[in-house]
Amino acid sequence: MTTTLEQLETPALILDEQRMDRNIERMRSQVRRLGVSFRPHVKTNKCMEVSRRLMDSAQGPITVSTLLEADFFAAQGVTDILYAVCIAPNKIDHVMRLQDQGVKLSIILDSLETARCVVDRAKAAKRHFDVLIEIDSDGHRSGVKPEAVELLEIGRYLEANGIPVMGVLTHAGESYNCDTPALLRAMAEQERAAVVRAAQRLREAGMACPVVSVGSTPTALFAEQLAGVTEVRAGVFVFFDLVMAGIGVCTVDDIALSVLASVIGHQPEKGWTIVDAGWMAMSRDRGTQKQKIDQGYGLVCDIDGRPLDDLVMVGANQEHGIIAHRDGRVDGVRHLPVGTLLRILPNHACPTAAQYPHYNVLDGSSRGITTLWPRFSGW
């Protein structure tokens, strides 16, 4: 029997299946146009029902950001997995356990220090590891610069100790700070050029380096060409969020994820409406704070997902959200009676989804919840 939004206890995580499917097809079409393989990142959705729609086959490939994700998907029969966070020594035993289950789990590193740890464990355990070197293409996070001396030192050390360099990988996180199509296209090209150059240097030094991997939702969708790249990774595109809308990667109407909340009170002299969804329901993420339009803790919509009068969640306590007009005005703010159901779009889909055990899957043509899809969190 179909449940309606009105029957749900709030707060609840709502997934618009039609919007999600549209977002997936947009990315798949782009990857086909670019002529590269697709290794979707499942860290955003952490759900088998969603990930099945992303993968090329039941075995993968996928990208994960935690080894718990690798465990979960391995238990579902996925065998081609890339763990896209630099490996820590205390996780190598976990990697080996996954290998013992038949998983081809690739790991990444970005320093000679870590390479030594991997080689030592490989020798002690008589194991082989598939290793990629992470490249810093934008100064945003981790990775070795494509022209750095250390790049070749890492590669030579691995190869000299029986671990061929499987490839290079980068993530242009700085793309989240680009806010025009021209800047997004330029960042996509910067990402491509950096990782391709790193692969070229390794090959010139005698290493095969067959994999050249790039990945972020903005650069994947705005890349004009990916010459020299073998695969694309991306994840948040499946739901999108206000950060992505704020930089022009999607529109608000593309955002497939929302939090259903109930009005529980008012502070009329302040222009506030109080809802039962605070930062535990929305997350602490304030990713739009430095964008041209600050969406507070989330953009407020009516029960059908239509934005309401420039209302945003301006404040959040643990279980209380404060809804107000974004310009702070008090007079003329719409009165929303106690019990009114609102849908609040998140700044960042990943941490908001992480607050919940399942998605309430919405039939986008109605208010009907067709099914529940379980998800997981943790490390």
Image (cartoon, rainbow, N blue to C red):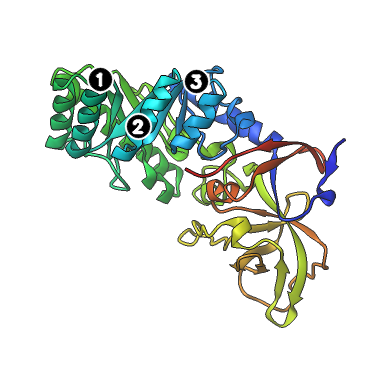
The residue tagged 3 is 32
Q: Nearer the viewer, mark 1 or mark 3?
A: 1
Dot 3 and dot 2 residues touching (CB under 8 Å): no
Q: Give coordinates of residue 114: x percent, y percent.
A: 22, 37
Residue 110 screen position, x and y as percent? 25, 37
Which quadrant does the N terminus fall into? top right
User: Which class describes the residues within 10 Å of circle 2: few (<14), some (14-19), or many (20+)?
Assistant: few
**x and y, in percent, of residue 15 in the image:** 68, 41
Could you tell which of marks 3 and 2 lies nearer the N-terminus?
3
The type of residue carrying mark 1 is Lys
For the question of whether residue 207 can be seen, the reply is yes
Tell me the element at label 2: helix
Say which residue label 2 marks: 93
> Residue drawn at (67%, 49%), measured in percent from left and top?
258
Distance from the alpha carbon under mark 3 to that under mark 2: 37 Å
Q: Is residue 228 visible?
A: no
Tell me the CA gap for discs 1 and 3. 39 Å
Does 323 appear above or below 200?
below
Q: Which residue is mark 1?
A: 126
Indicate the amino acid at tag 2. Answer: Asp
Are there few (<14), some (14-19), or many (20+) residues within 10 Å of tag 1? few
- In this rendering, the answer to whether 326 lies above or below 106 is below
Seen from the viewer's position, the closer of residues 278 and 135 is 278
The quadrant holding residue 273 is bottom right
168 relative to 310, above or below: above
